[in-house]
Amino acid sequence: MYTPPFFKQDRAASLKLADERGFGTFCAWDGTRPIASQLPFYVSYAADGTPQVAFHVARHNPLVKLGDGSTSWLLAINGPDAYVSPDWYVSPDQVPTWLYQSVHLTGPVRVLSDAELSVQIDTLSAKFEDWLLPKKPWTSAKMTAGRFETMKRAIVGLVMTVEEVEGSFKLNQHKSEADFAAVVIALDNGDADAKAISRLMRQTRPQIFADQAVADDTNKLERSAT
């Protein structure tokens, strides 16, 4: 992943985004062309601390043949993203750009055993069912044994041993405080992704907005006193 120094993220922050997102594009080279699928996953850690990414695919997915334990795969995970207009900056002569969060995980992938696949299915579903609380979580135990086994035969469980972690969080870190704040305010009026980027930018340089909040409170007090 090409990442300018301003936007480079450390290993912990990158893995945190990957785990929170839980959905990405898995890609591998079959010797002729790249093969890719968009899939949910969860992150776990081996006894030695090595990150692992567990997921499954349809049995007839061509990626299955590349889960040989040695072929290197790429998993690309994207967070929120938003367009930035040059008109939003305080400084002149700016250009359009795009702000985003992106993480790439790379490593070999192997096929899971049947027992490992059962655990993977339950762990993966539990991860996303937790997002729906207080709904009572779905579990595979709700299925009849025969039906569950039939469904399992239609998929193949896989796990990536993560050898490389790369993260790029482009949040205008290289801009002046005035330009940074102006873009944050503009993004506050955008769609859900734009608002998410705005929140991340505020977290990146909180002092800018802490000072603004104090100034706003002071102005309110002065107006109420008159």
Image: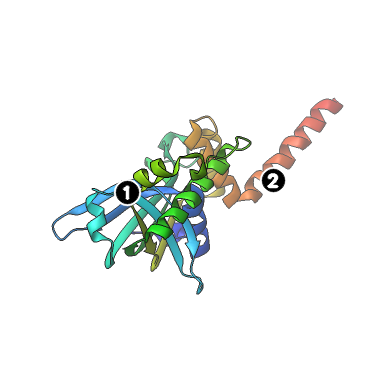
Q: Residue furthest left?
A: 32
Q: Residue at x 28, y 54 (%)?
A: 27
Which comes before the other along the chain, label 2 or label 1?
1
Q: How was the colour assigned to the protein in this rendering?
A: rainbow
Q: Residue furthest right?
A: 225
Name the residue beneath numbered marker 2: 211
Q: Mark 2 packing: few (<14 Cα in 10 Å), some, or many (20+)? A: few
Please state which of residues 222 and 206 is positioned toward the viewer in this rendering. Answer: 206
Please state which of residues 74 and 178 is positioned toward the viewer in this rendering. Answer: 74
Secondary structure of residue under mark 1: helix
Q: Of the residues shown, which amino acid type is indicated by label 2?
A: Asp
Secondary structure of residue under mark 2: helix
Dot label at residue 153: 1
Q: Of the residues shown, which amino acid type is indicated by label 1?
A: Arg
Q: Is residue 169 left or right of residue 74?
A: right
Q: Residue at x 33, y 64 (%)?
A: 110
Q: Residue at x 38, y 69 (%)?
A: 163
Q: Is residue 19 visible?
A: yes
The quarter in which the C terminus is drawn is top right
